[in-house]
Amino acid sequence: MSEWWTYRPSDFLLFSPQTYYRLFELYNIDIWPMQVVSLALCTAIITLAVRNPAWQGRAISAILASCWLWVAAAYLLQHYSTINWAARYFAIGFTIEAILLIWYGIIRDRLLFRSVEPACQRAGIGVFLFALVFQPFIAPLVGREWIQAEIFGVAPDPTVTATLGLLLLADNKPHWLLMIIPFIWCTISGVTLWTMKSPDFFITPLAALLVLGLAAWKVFMLPKQYSEK
């Protein structure tokens, strides 16, 4: 029997890269035309963020919660669980995040997706648009098929990244409780892609680190700036 220190992370991977990306291909085929619905939801979020109606926070929270629930049920439980037994536990985490968004954003109306701090506002918008526009292009950019693209609202990585961007944009104090599960998923996703030697393994964790750094900056630097004025 081999000693434990001789094992590599890839030895614990339950599937091959080909199986993993083939799963996205089959998933995108199965859920069509939900990708079109996702595009409509993206447009709705952008419109709400720009126009900022009184019910903006509730509406965007409802959209995000529905996306997290969809990913939990349609992707993690019905598809990813066929190749990874841990997917059912990931689905629980995504469901908890949806419940938190419903509780804080809809029931308590505590989320306003507009920061008065320009740096956080620009970064939040940038991370959100990155998830919407760039992440679907990662698949063809690294040599995979278009049909394997991951899209906000139906795939976990862009959904998590976009949520972090919006949470960074929300209010002037970080909503740490709402960020815990997205940060955990970014770590899991990054490690999974790294073990598969995927060239894009760093993208989601890097976005999470950016949001974490700016959220911490909100906590420690903004109060000092306002106290000096």
Image (spheres, helix red, strand yellow):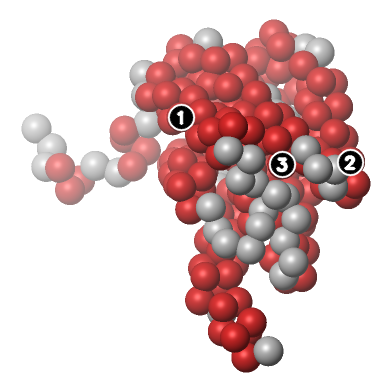
Sequence-first tag of 3 and 1: 3
**Quadrant (top left, top right, bottom left, bottom right) of the N terminus:** top left
Check disc 1: other Cα within 10 Å, few if <14, some if 14-19, many if 20+.
some
Q: Is mark 1 on a helix, strand or loop?
A: helix
Given residues 1 and 130, the one toward you in this image is: 130
Pinpoint residue 28: horizontal percent, then vertical percent: 71, 17
Task: Determine which of the numbered discs, if any, sits on residue 57 in the image.
Answer: 3
What's the distance in space between the residues labelled 3 and 2, CA to CA?
12 Å
Please, is residue 221 above or below residue 61 in the view? below
Given residues 135 and 73, the one toward you in this image is: 73
Q: Is residue 76 left or right of residue 142?
A: left
Pinpoint residue 75: horizontal percent, then vertical percent: 57, 19
Residue at image location 71% in from the left, 11% down from the top:
31
Q: Mark 1 highlights which residue?
A: 96
Kind of residue at badge 2? Thr
Q: What element carries label 2?
A: helix
Pinpoint residue 135: horizontal percent, then vertical percent: 72, 42
Please, is residue 214 above or below residue 44 in the view? below
Q: In this view, does 74 lie to the left or right of 81?
A: right
Answer yes or no: is residue 65 visible.
Answer: yes
What's the distance in space between the residues labelled 3 and 1, CA to CA?
19 Å
**Quarter of the image where one finds residue 157:** top right
Sequence-first tag of 3 and 2: 2
Q: Mark 2 highlights which residue?
A: 47
Kind of residue at badge 3? Gly
Can you name the residue that lies furthest to the bottom here? 228
